[in-house]
Amino acid sequence: MKALYKNRTALLVFIAPAVLMVGLLVFFPVLLNIYYSLFKWTAYSADMKFVGLKYYAKLFSDDKIVLAIKNNVMYAVVSLICQTGLGLIIAHLFVTFANTRYAAITRVVIFVPAVISLTAIGLLWVIAYNPSLGYVNAILEAIGLGSLAHDWLGDAKTAMMSIIMVSQWQYIGEMVLLYTVGLQAVPTDIYESAKIDGASNWQTFLHVTIPMIKSTILMNMTITIIGAFMVFDEVYVMTSGGPGGATETLATLMYETGFRKDNMGYASAIGVLLFVITFAFSFIQLRLYNVNEMMGGEKS
Amino acid sequence: MSAGSKVKRGIVHLMMTVYMIIIVFPLMWMLISGFKTNSEIFGSPWSLPSSLDPKNYIYAWQTYIQRATLNSIFFTVLGTALTVIIAGMAAYAVIRFRMKARYIVFIFILSGMMLAPQCSLIPIYKMLGITHLYNTRLGLLLPYVAYRIPFSFFMMWSFMVTLPIEVEEAATIDGCSVFGTFFRVVMPMCKPAIATTAVMCARFIWNDFAFALVFTEGKALQTVPLSIFSMRSTSQTDWGVLLSGLTLAALPMVIMYIFLQKYFVSGANSGAVKG
């Protein structure tokens, strides 16, 4: 690539703000988090007592952490099935069978919840799930499933799943949209030839479509998994981790430990654990962007 | 079209209609129930409000949402503008300046995308405390901008890299400074990328809950998501007011989405489809 400018002062002015902000507020906190996790400290006192790896040892024997990870994993699995799996099937059906205009309208409508804040959506569903004023139980009764009706968020057995389903309601539409672009990019003559070979719709989907959009699927899977491990807003807003800690996730547990129980050192250790998990998947995701190829291709 | 595929199309259309109802019903229910009195809400979730008296909406707006909306507009507009300019400048520098560390700078900023903001709530909280930026406008604005830079940089970079260098060369020959060329020639050419980047930034900042929860306290800096969350605890018994507040909180983004749909769509896609 040809360089247009050689002015070093101007260069500094152009890159320093971005580099400094990303360095100081995105990268540095990660290191600081590791440092803070080695000390016992509270938010309102300057005292910091070095405890070494004590909190990490605690991480692995803490039942609350195990439950939180379980909840995060459940979040990830359900989201993978509904968003990356069902989302793909829905997108495929829309593209293959539906009237183009009607499909476009549907995609616009089902994306709406995804632009609204998790906080507003979460609170809406808190009311919807409420046994005395919401519509969830009322709908169940109307379709003859009244026996299932109960306090969805108040029951430790159903609370987590109820939160997870809200997230599916909110985000499947976005996934459908993401897949649609990938599906529309598949050249139609491939489908024609599959048809001539006598492949059924289902066979074509499995053996032609899926391999063609493999990279989109992989990307959507990593996005979904990262999202599932970062979950904070909707859980905090809907149950604050309750009832009895049943819906605690890593992020809410970190918040709870740090800002409610004022055990900042342990909260930092939870933050580091959260970092390791999300970083691993983000790393895979960034590999899928193919940065090297991008810069390499542009260099030559 | 064969009979078989007509049937299939019919089934898919039916599915689409049901899906749209599943999405629209809760939102309409929220909008309509916002007009109900408390006794009507407890009466039946199916009943319609006896009057369309907007007193819940007026009360929710005046007591909670108005101030919060102003705060949210402040953070969203300023944060988005700063992000676009800072990310745009960095992207431009990586493309057009002679720089040995070009690749390192590129990877450095881009790698920021790998770090989830949730993990760093505690260290940033502490940093803001040490620098006396906790619970200040700047203290919330800076993390918003910093966490939006990597993705915005990527968006701006992918667009700028396709721009023809000749236009800028001509501007330089005409005596335009680096800054003049960037702001008056390059940025105007980047309008589509800027629109998509800005919409993504605005969506993130407007909807953020975690940063605002941890980096601010009290009513003065409360953004919309925090204000509706605090409504829940303070107006716990007044569900009509809460529902109208939720509707008011959701509305700005939905309206923005209706008008700027194509940028929401391209933004969502750029995050997922490989460059």
Image: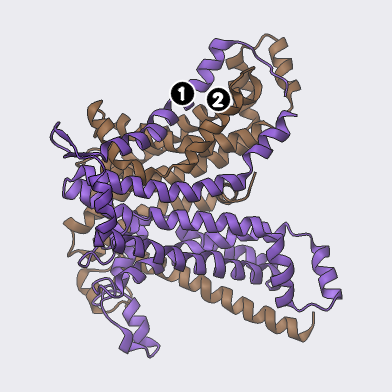
Chain colours: A purple, B brown
Q: Which mark is residue A115?
A: none
Q: Residues within 10 Å of mark 2 (few under 14, many from 20)?
A: many
- Depth check, front residue: A239 or B170: A239
Disc 2 and disc 1 on one polypeptide chain: no
Q: Quadrant of the N terminus of chain B?
A: bottom right
- In the image, residue A89 above or below residue B227: below
Residue A10 screen position, x and y as percent = 55, 13
What's under tag 1, amino acid-wise? Pro
Q: Which residue is mark 2?
A: B89
* Residue ID at (32%, 50%): B225
Q: Quadrant of the C terminus of chain B?
A: top right
Residue A128: image quadrant is bottom left
Who's the residue at 71% across and 32% down the image? Answer: A298
Question: Residue B124 in the image: x percent, y percent?
Answer: 31, 35
Q: Position of residue A210 (x, y in %)?
A: 68, 65
Please name the residue shown 74% across and 27% down the image. Answer: B164
On the rendered structure, is A23 left or right of A263? right
What secondary structure is found at the residue carrying circle 2? Answer: helix
**Would you call the spot at circle 1 few (<14 residues within 10 Å), some (14-19), or many (20 or more)?**
some
Please tell me in which quadrant of the rendered image residue B250 appears. bottom left
Q: Nearer the viewer, residue A5 or B115?
A: B115
Disc 1 target residue: A17
Q: Chain of mark 2?
A: B
The percent position of residue B137, horizontal first and vertical second, equals 30, 32
Q: Look at label 2 and name its amino acid.
A: Met
The answer to whether the residues at label 2 and label 1 have Cβ atoms under 8 Å apart is: yes
SS assignment at label 1: helix
Asked whether the viewer can see residue B260, the reply is no
Relative to B115, is B56 on the left or the right? left
